[in-house]
Amino acid sequence: MQNRLYDLRFLVDKYEWRVRAKRSLVFQLWKKYHPPINGNVNILDYGCGTGVLQEEFEKKFNVKGFGIDVSKKAIDYSKKRGLDRIKLFNGKKIPFKSDYFGLVTAIDVLEHIEDDLGALREIKRVLKKGGLAILLVPAHPRLWSTRDVNLHHFRRYQAGELEGRCKLAGFKLLSSKNVDFALYLLFNIICLSAPKKNGIPQLKMDIATASTNKFINEIIFAYEWMENILQKFITFPIGLSIAVVVQKV
């Protein structure tokens, strides 16, 4: 991700509807799937960005948070939030010993990694037996646009693709959910109507950070929160992203 985007993320990550909704979903999945655990749990935010997920996870649950990121700017911003268990990451080998974490989160990260299978195997290495990984990735290659290019994505995932990679890495699949049903419909319309160059929709803005009006921001978050709650009871037929929970067995 471009350095200037970390500046933006540091300013908006606390309140922006999109990232708040993602955190809400991660917490919901953790509460549902984590095994009974005695004592503190070490968790790792793989691709921690400016550190908000780690910060809020520690506040909400009895866990000890760690973070890694390939960007020094992200590390600096995480430390600015008062987080000290943060490490710069070389993009390949996770700088922690094997069997160390009860949970690894990778939220909008794997699409940035060319060898995503290698990344999943590293995540499995640092997890304890029975530990979980919560993964969120963008879906549908047909929605590839200049937004993906600008965010340095290698892919958008096809249905079943991430789940297949996780099985190849040796994980047990616990859950796979389509996320952001309404956003998929909106984004599909945006991509269809946007001007094209070499068949690629030319999007001029990052719509995930477009909501600067606080009232609109709260309305959209309320909808996203309700959609997260519905995930407990139904499986949406399609979504802008895919959320997967896997376990090391």
Image: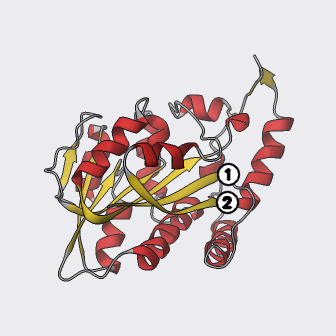
- Point out which mark residue 26 bears: none
Q: In the rendered image of this protein, does residue 133 appear above or below residue 29? A: above
Q: Which residue is mark 2?
A: 180
Which quadrant holds residue 104? bottom left
Q: 209 or 165: nearer the eye?
A: 165
- What residue occupies the far top of the structure in this picture? 198
Quarter of the image with the C terminus in it? bottom left
Residue 111 pos. (x, y %): 50, 39
Q: 61 or 235: nearer the eye?
A: 235
Q: Amino acid at mark 2?
A: Asp
Residue 97 pos. (x, y %): 13, 50
Q: 19 or 213: nearer the eye?
A: 19
Q: CA distance from mark 2 to mark 1?
A: 5 Å
- Whether residue 115 is visible, yes or no, is yes
- Whether residue 82 is visible, yes or no, is no
Q: Secondary structure at mark 2?
A: loop
Quarter of the image with the N terminus in it? top left
Q: Which residue is mark 1?
A: 240
Q: Secondary structure at mark 1?
A: loop
Crowd band around label 2 with a 10 angstrom C-alpha radius: few (<14), some (14–19), many (20+): many
Residue 92 pos. (x, y %): 27, 34
Which quadrant holds residue 143? top right
Residue 224 pos. (x, y %): 65, 69
Q: In the rendered image of this protein, does residue 52 appear above or below residue 74? A: below
Q: Is residue 100 left or right of residue 167?
A: left
Q: 62 or 53: nearer the eye?
A: 62
Sequence-wise, the earlier of marks 2 and 1 is 2
Q: Residue at x 32, y 43 (%)?
A: 121
Q: In the rendered image of this protein, does residue 226 appear above or below residue 102? A: below
Q: Residue at x 60, y 47 (%)?
A: 160
Q: Amino acid at mark 1?
A: Leu
Colour scheme used in the picture? secondary structure
